Image (cartoon, rainbow, N blue to C red):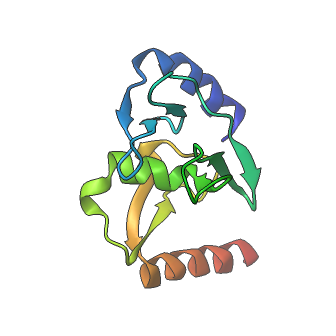
Amino acid sequence: MDKAERKKMKKLKFDEKFKPCRGNDLLDVSQYGRVRLADTEIILRQIEIDNHYFVENPKKPGNEGAFEKVHRLVALTWLGDDYDKSKEVHHINFNSYDNRVDNLKWLDKGTHEKLHEERRKEQKG
C-alpha cells in the first residue's frame, strides 16, 4: 500500500466495522484487514512473513503459537459466502499487504496461478 492509500485508509477508519471471524470465534475482523480479540477488542499486532501479514492465533488447545494469514481471515469473514476449500484468496491489485475486503476475492487455484503468471510475464516485458 503506498503513502496515499495509507492516508486514505486512516481517514476511513471512522467507518471501520468488525465482524466475528468465520471459523474462529475468538477473533473479530474489520473490512480494512485489522484483527482483534473478540472478548477484549484488543487489536492484534500483524507480522510480515513471506510478503504477507499474519496474526498470531489466540492460544487454543493443540494450536499454540499458530499464525493465520490476515487476507484469509478477511476473506472468510467478509466474503465467506463464496468460500470453498478449493479456492484461494487473490489480491486484486497484486499488493499482498493490502488486505482490505475491496481488494480481495476468491479464485480457484488454476485461475489464481494463471493471473499471477500473466502478471509476471507483463512485468518482464
Q: Residue furthest front?
A: 61
Q: Residue furthest left?
A: 81
Q: Give the camera-side residue of 65 and 19.
A: 65
Q: At 41% from the left edge and 44% from the top edge, which residue is drawn?
A: 102
**Whole-percent x, y for residue 46 in the image:** 68, 40
**What is the quadrant of residue 3 in the picture?**
top right
Q: At 39% from the left edge and 71% from the top edge, which residue is drawn?
A: 107
Relative to residue 50, is residue 68 drawn left or right? left
**Whole-percent x, y for residue 83 in the image:** 31, 64
**Whole-percent x, y for residue 28 in the image:** 43, 35
Quadrant for the C terminus in the image: bottom right
Relative to residue 21, is residue 82 drawn left or right? left
Q: At 24% from the left edge and 57% from the top edge, which residue is drawn?
A: 81
Can you say whether 52 is above or below 34 in the image? Answer: below
Q: Give the camera-side residue of 3 and 86.
A: 86
Quadrant for the N terminus in the image: top right
**What is the quadrant of residue 10 in the picture?**
top right
